[in-house]
Image: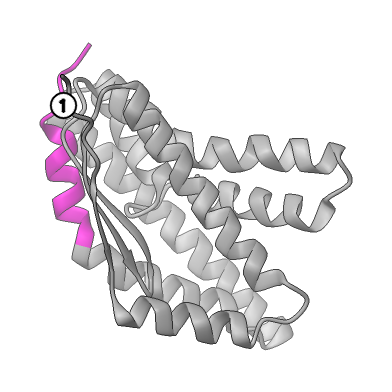
Amino acid sequence: MRHRYFPKIEMSFWFFLGLSLFLLFDQGNLGSMCVAAVLLHELGHIAAMTLLGVKIQRIRLTPFGIDLERGEAGSIRSELMIHLSGPLTNLCLAALLAGMGKFHFSAVNCALGLFELCPLPTLDGGQAIFCLTQQLFPLEKAQRWSSILETTSFVLIFTLAGILFFMKQNLTLLFLLFGISVSLFQKESGIKGKIRKGKRL
């Protein structure tokens, strides 16, 4: 009899504390919609991994999001599909929800999907760009081109954040970029190391 494999799920006290405080101060159910959109985003990734036969080893719920530890995909093309599956799930749901008149939840999904497609290293868009450049160029050249695109995108977004701050005194985007910067230095090398092991098609 074949046994089904289930990934290990880890949830810390800090995850529940952060989620509880986030929902406690939620106004207008925006926080609840954001949490739901993030969960749907990760389910999109999980569905793609399952269809491609990629083994999910561990799902870790943290105060800063959901980390999926998985095996290697069989090819760069499979890696690309996995990275794009999350944002595309949000964007498809946004279109469906808009047609149903659920405009607030549609807007949240649309915003998350487009944000994740930004070509920054720790986001799905950055990883997708790296996969595409590996399909077109040798590894070293692919790394160089993806780094150029990522740096350019980062500078443009920081410039936009600065303009918003001086025009409207809005720090939201700056805080968001700071969080991405911290995550970048922690995860970039590990993520790219996994992608490099994929096979070219």
Measured along the vertical axis of the image, is residue 124 above or below residue 177? above
96 or 135: nearer the eye? Answer: 96
Label 1 SS: loop
Is 124 on the left or on the right of 34, as rendered? left
Q: Amino acid at mark 1?
A: Gly
189 in magenta = yes
Residue 178 location, x and y as percent? Answer: 40, 76
Which of the 4 image quarters holds residue 159?
bottom right
> Which residue is rendered at x = 48% and y = 73% of the image?
176
Q: Which residues are magenta?
A: 187-201
> Which residue is rendered at x = 47% and y = 38% of the image?
44
> Which residue is rendered at x = 70% and y = 70% of the image?
30
Q: Which residue is mark 1?
A: 198
Which of the 4 image quarters holds residue 99?
top right
Is 199 on the left or on the right of 63, as rendered? left
**Residue at the far right in the pictured view:** 101
> Which residue is rendered at x = 56% and y = 74% of the image?
173
Q: Is residue 80 visible?
A: no
Residue 97 location, x and y as percent? Answer: 78, 42
User: Across the whole image, how many numbered discs are drawn on residues?
Assistant: 1
163 in magenta = no
Q: Is residue 190 visible?
A: yes
- Image quadrant holding the N terminus, namely top left
Residue 124 location, x and y as percent? Answer: 40, 45
**Magenta span: chief secondary structure:** helix
Is 118 on the left or on the right of 73, as rendered? right
**Residue at the far top in the pictured view:** 201
196 or 75: nearer the eye? Answer: 75
